[in-house]
Image: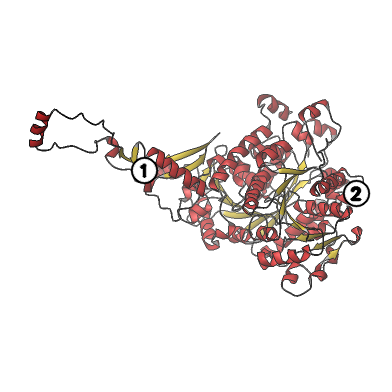
Amino acid sequence: MSARRIVVTSGKGGVGKTTTTANLGAALALRGKRVVLVDADIGLRNLDLVLGLEKRIVFDLVEVVEGRCQLRQALIKDKRFGELLSILPAAQTRDKTAVTENQFATVIDELAELCDYVIIDCPAGIEHGFRNAVAGAREAIVVTTPEVSAIRDADRVIGKLNERGLPIRLIVNRIRPDMVRSGDMLSVEDVCEILSAELLGIVPDDEDVIDTTNRGEPIALKADSRLAAIYEKIARRLEGEIVPFTVLGAPTFLSRLLGRKAG
Amino acid sequence: MLEFFKRIFNPQPSSVTARERLRLVLLSDHLALAPDVVESLKADLIAVISKYVDVDADHCDVTFEQQESVVAMLANIPILGMKPVAKAPRPAPPPALRQAQDDMPPPITDPSPVSASTAKPRRRRRRRSNANAAPAHG
Amino acid sequence: MHPSTELRAGYLEEDPLPAAPPAPQRRGRCIVVTSGKGGVGKTTTTANVGVALAAGGARVVLVDADVGLRNLDIVLGLEARVRHHVLDVLEGQAELDDALVSDKRVSGLKLLAASQTREKDDVDTPAFRGLIDQLRERFDYVLIDCPAGIEKGFQNAIAGADEAIIVCTPEVSAVRDADRVVGLLGERVKVTLIVNRLRPALVRRGKMLSVEDVNAILRLPLLGVIADEPGVIVSTNKGEPIALDVASPTGQAYRKIAGRIVGTETSAPEIPREATFFGKLFGGQR
C-alpha cells in the first residue's frame, strides 16, 4: 500500500515547519512507522541540520531528479531510529527553480512505495518552492504561530491548498500561555476561529528546542521533554486516534474556566 | 512601570486588537483574492439598481476598501436617467369624443423626463488593462 | 509678490519639509533588509529602523518586496490605508503618489506596499530598479523589506540596493541561511549585521549561540544586537512599531541602529546582558 504524503507548510518563514517535520517524523518512527522526510527547500536546506545529519549528505534531491544518482543512494538513514527514518536532503547550491512540479511529484511517488509516511518540509512562500512541495502531497499540515503576520500568511496558504483540494490540519506553534493569559497573545481558540481549520496540535514555546537543534537532536527523542510528549500525541492524532488536548502547566481555577489548552 | 500605567489607561489587551485587525485584513485579502465573486456581486448590484434607474453598465465599478474599523464596499455607478414610470391605462373615451380625437393630430409626448441626472452621464476614465485585475488596494 | 517670496511659496507647496533646497545630484541611500531564513525579524527591522530614521528627521520610504505575502503594512499598523501597491505603479494602474501611504505618527515616513494577490514573478526587475531609483531622488532612505528565500523575490529586492542589512537570529539554520545570502550578495553591496532575538540567559548557559559565535561565521560589521522581547509581539498585535516606545529596550536598540546608519551614533553595539532582579522589576530586560 502506498504511503501517506503530507506537506508541512505555513507561508510565513520561521514558524517551525522544519522543526515540526523533523519531530513529527521522529515521533512516527518511534511508533514503528517507516518515514521518509523530504527537504523541499532547495538552496536553503535545513532539515539535515536540524536532525544532525548534515555531515552525511552525499547526494540530494536535485541530483536524483537530474538522474545523477539513484533515489536510494540519496536517502540518509537516521541511525537513531533503526531502519525507520530517512531523509532526502535538498541541494544547497541551486535554487527552487531547479526542479519542476512534475519532477518533484515523481520523486514523491517513488518514495511512497518505500514507506508508510512521506513528509515534505515546504519552504517559506507560495511560489515555485511551495508549488513543488505541494505537487507531491495528498494532505497538508499548516503550521502557524499565534502572531498577526503568521496567521495572515497561513490564511493565504490555506486558500492555495483549498484550491488544490488538499485536506488541511493546523498546528499552532510557540504558544506562550502566560502571554495568552495576560491578553498579549492570541489564543489557540482565536487562531482556529480565524483560520477555520481543524486543529492537529498545540506546541508551546520551549527554549529547549534551540538547544536540541544546536546539537542536531530532535526534541522528540528527549524522553523527559514535554514537547516529546506533545509530538507523540500529534503523531497519534495523525494516525486517527482521538487524543484530547491537555492543559499546560499547573491548571489554575481560572485556566480551567477559560479552557487554556495545549498538547 | 510604564507598562503598568499603560495597562490602566489603555485597557484593551493587544490580543483583542490583533483579533480585530486580522478579521478586517483577512476579509480585505479574501475579497481581493476572489475577483469572480466581486464580478458576480457587481453584476447583481447593477441588475438591482437598473430596476429603478438606467445605468451606464460599461463604466460601473465596485471596489472594497479597508477603513478604520470596517471593510467598506464602494460602488461607482453612473446613472443615465430614471426609468420611465409605468402609467395606468386611460379609460376609453365615449364614442363621440373618440371620433373627434381621431380627427386631431397626435399629441407630442416626451418619452424620458428631463432631470439633472441625465444632464451628462458621468464617465470615469479608468484604464484597466486587465478586466480581472484585483481591486485598487491589491 | 517679491520674486523670492513667490519662489519660496511655490517650493513650500511642493515640499513642506523644512529642508535646504535639494542639491541636484543628491540621491538617497537604498538599503535592503534581508536574511535568507524567514521569520527572523526582517519586516520588524525594516519597519522599526524606518520609523527611527524618520523620527530623526530623515525622509524615509519603506518598500515591501514580499509580493503575495505582504506584512510590512500590518506591522506598521497601516493595513487599512493601503490603496495601491508596487505592481499597480509599475503597470501604470496608479501613480506613485497615490500608492505612497503616509504614517500619521511619524512625519517623513511613507510606505509602498506589496500586492497581496500577485506573485513575485510578476515584478519586472529592471522596472522595479527604475522605481527604486525614482524613490532615491525623493527620499533620504529607501528601505526594502526582502522576502525569505533566494529566488526572484530576493533578486528583485536587492536589485536597486547598494547596502544590505542581514538580520540573523542566533540559531544554526538562520546563520547558515545568512551565510548563503552573504555569498550571493558578494562584493556588490556594503553589508552589515543585526543579531536579533538574543536570549542572554540561554547564551550564558551555553544553550544558544552568542553574538561572537554568529559573527565568527558571518564576519560582518555589527550594526546592532537586539534581545528577545515579548513586547515586540504586543507591538505587532497593535500595529505600533516598538521604536516609538521610549521605554522598550528593543525600541532603544532600533533607535541606536538608526543612529549608526546615519552616522550620529558612534558607540559600538552593546551586547544585551542577562536581566537582573531589579532590572526585571523596573520593566527592563536588557
**Closer to viewer: mark 1 or mark 2:** 2
Report which quarter residue A56 is drawn in: bottom right
Q: Residue at x 85, y 43 (%)?
A: C201
Residue A148 visible in the snapshot: yes
Q: Please provide percent x and percent y for residue B46.
A: 40, 42
Please identify the residue farthest to the front as the structure is shown: B95
Are the residues under marks 1 and 2 on the same chain? no
Q: Which quadrant: the N terminus of chain C?
A: top left
Q: What residue did someone put label 2 on?
A: A222
Total labels: the figure holds 2
Which coloring applies here?
Answer: secondary structure
Q: Badge 2, how many Cα within 10 Å: few under 14, some, many 20+?
A: some
Residue flagged by tag 1: what amino acid is it? Glu
Q: Is residue A125 above or below residue C57?
A: below
Q: Badge 1, how many Cα within 10 Å: few under 14, some, many 20+?
A: few
Q: Is residue B115 above or below residue C213?
A: above
Q: Please provide percent x and percent y for residue C30.
A: 59, 55
Q: Is residue C245 above or below residue A49?
A: above
Chain letter of disc 1? C
Residue flagged by tag 2: what amino acid is it? Lys
Residue A187 visible in the snapshot: no
Looking at the rendered structure, the secondary structure element under dot 1 is helix
CA–CA distance in space, label 1 to label 2: 76 Å
Question: Which label was assigned to residue C6?
Answer: 1
Q: Residue at x 75, y 31 (%)?
A: A182
State the residue in front, C284 or B8.
Answer: B8
Chain letter of disc 2? A
Q: Which quadrant: the C terminus of chain C?
A: top right
Q: Please provide percent x and percent y for residue C182.
A: 71, 61
State the residue in front, A89 or A75.
Answer: A75
Q: Please provide percent x and percent y for residue A201.
A: 78, 44
Looking at the rendered structure, the secondary structure element under dot 2 is loop
